[in-house]
Image (cartoon, rainbow, N blue to C red):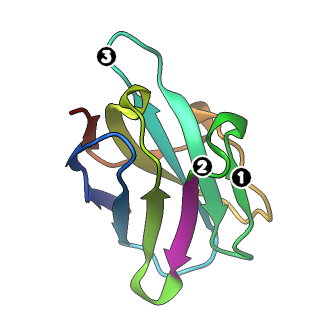
Amino acid sequence: QLQLVESGGGLVQPGGSLRLSCAASGFSSLNYAVGWFRQAPGKEREGVSCITFLNGRTTIADSLKGRFTISTDNAENTVFLQLNSLKPEDTAVYYCAARNILITSCVLRDSEYTYWGQGTQVTVST
């Protein structure tokens, strides 16, 4: 059974940075894509970025390009989300999710993902 555990969230001032980690266990193949999503209070969950383990191809929400970067350490089955130039509107619970599929590109539709972590809180405030 695939399990995902997020870490790295916290309180940061505007303009600061955080690096979120998503450690995956229970699988050992390239047939996965992993995505990061976030949900702010009172708002719907939105896709942030995703990456395929097969070829490392990434997708990122247009509004976040230039500030957020997704990467993987395949040997450790870990996916990272680097958050830079953080703004108060980035405050949310950030979730990682995975789907078991052999694909060369991923999408940011949460309905496509089967496995979800518990989330990590990111708060951007003075």
**Quarter of the image holding residue 124?**
top left
The three-letter amino acid code for the residue at tag 2 is Ser
Q: Is residue 37 above or below residue 23?
A: above
- Please report the residue visible at 58 percent of the width from the left and 32 percent of the height from the top: 111
- Please report the residue visible at 29 percent of the width from the left and 56 percent of the height from the top: 6
Q: Residues within 10 Å of mark 3 (few under 14, many from 20)?
A: few
Please report whichever mark, 1 or 2, sits nearer to the chain's N-terminal start: 2
Are the residues at dot 3 and dot 1 in contact (C-beta closer than 8 Å)?
no
Q: Is residue 70 above or below residue 38?
A: below
Res. 1 visible in picture: no
The three-letter amino acid code for the residue at tag 3 is Pro
Please report whichever mark, 3 or 1, sits nearer to the chain's N-terminal start: 3
Q: Is residue 70 above or below residue 68?
A: below
- Please report the residue visible at 46 percent of the width from the left and 90 percent of the height from the top: 75
The three-letter amino acid code for the residue at tag 1 is Thr
Secondary structure under the numbered disc 2 in the rendered image: strand
Are the residues at dot 1 and dot 2 in contact (C-beta closer than 8 Å)?
yes
- Please report the residue visible at 56 percent of the width from the left and 42 percent of the height from the top: 48
Residue 113 x, y percent position in the rendering: 55, 43
Tell whether 37 sits left or right of 16: right
Residue 49 - label: 2
Residue 125 colored in magenta in the image: no
Residue bounds of the magenta highlight: 68-73
Residue 41 - label: 3
Q: Which residue is mark 1?
A: 59
Tell whether 125 sits left or right of 109: left
Please report whichever mark, 3 or 2, sits nearer to the chain's N-terminal start: 3
Most common SS among magenta residues: strand
